[in-house]
Image: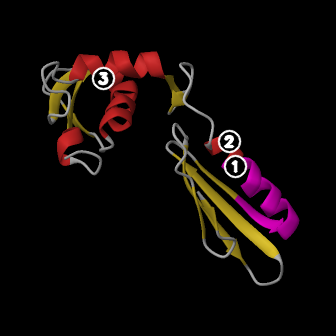
């Protein structure tokens, strides 16, 4: 992890829900801090330098916490993500591309599970049947995390 008060905070702790953070100094001592998690963006403007440093330090400490069983990604617990991914992934090859029709009411957790386990975005398209959606992803193997 690195802290560069003129550029970017980089969070690479295992299990961190923080994707990255950007710190911009306006030159007058005020700072704008933008933190992106996997589900939200927090922007704090006109922070005095001392408060920004304290906040950056707290964010760094938080990003170093290990993943616990009750940790969440986009509001879902790990067991729920495992269950949802198990419904759409190929049991013989979980790294394979995903193309499946699911209940529309399951779209949010399914997309979160795909993104969590494959590090790739999921595309949601309307399905032929009412109440269903078609979800596809290039899968872990073809994404940035997998060979």
Residue at the image position 75 percent from the left and 54 percent from the top: 57
Q: Where is mark 1, residue-wise?
A: 59
Q: Where is mark 2, residue-wise?
A: 62
Under circle 1, the secondary element is: helix
**Contact check, label 1 and label 3, Cβ < 8 Å:** no
Marker disc for residue 85: 3
Q: Is residue 40 left or right of residue 100?
A: right
**114 relative to 56, above or below:** above
Question: What's drawn in magenta, residue-wise?
Answer: 44-60
**105 relative to 139, above or below:** above
Residue at the image position 23 percent from the left and 40 percent from the top: 140
Image spot of residue 146 (x, y percent): 24, 45
Q: How many marks?
A: 3
> Gap in Å between the C-alphas at discs 3 and 2?
27 Å
Residue at the image position 70 percent from the left and 45 percent from the top: 61
Q: Is residue 143 left or right of residue 116?
A: left
Q: In which image quadrant can residue 138 be found?
A: top left
């Amino acid at each position: 992890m690195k802290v560069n008060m003129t550029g970017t905070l980089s969070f690479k702790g295992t299990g961190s829900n923080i994707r990255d953070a950007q710190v911009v100094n306006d030159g007058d001592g005020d700072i704008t801090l933008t933190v992106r998690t996997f589900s939200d963006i927090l922007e704090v403007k006109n922070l005095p330098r001392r408060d920004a440093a304290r906040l950056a330090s707290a964010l760094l400490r938080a990003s170093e916490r290990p993943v616990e069983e009750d940790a969440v990604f986009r509001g879902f617990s790990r067991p729920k993500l495992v269950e949802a991914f198990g419904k759409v992934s190929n049991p013989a090859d979980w790294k394979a591309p995903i193309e499946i029709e699911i209940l529309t009411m399951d779209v949010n957790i399914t997309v979160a599970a795909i993104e969590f386990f494959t590090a790739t975005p999921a595309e949601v398209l309307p399905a032929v049947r009412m109440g269903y959606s078609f979800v596809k992803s290039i899968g872990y193997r073809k994404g940035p995390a997998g060979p």
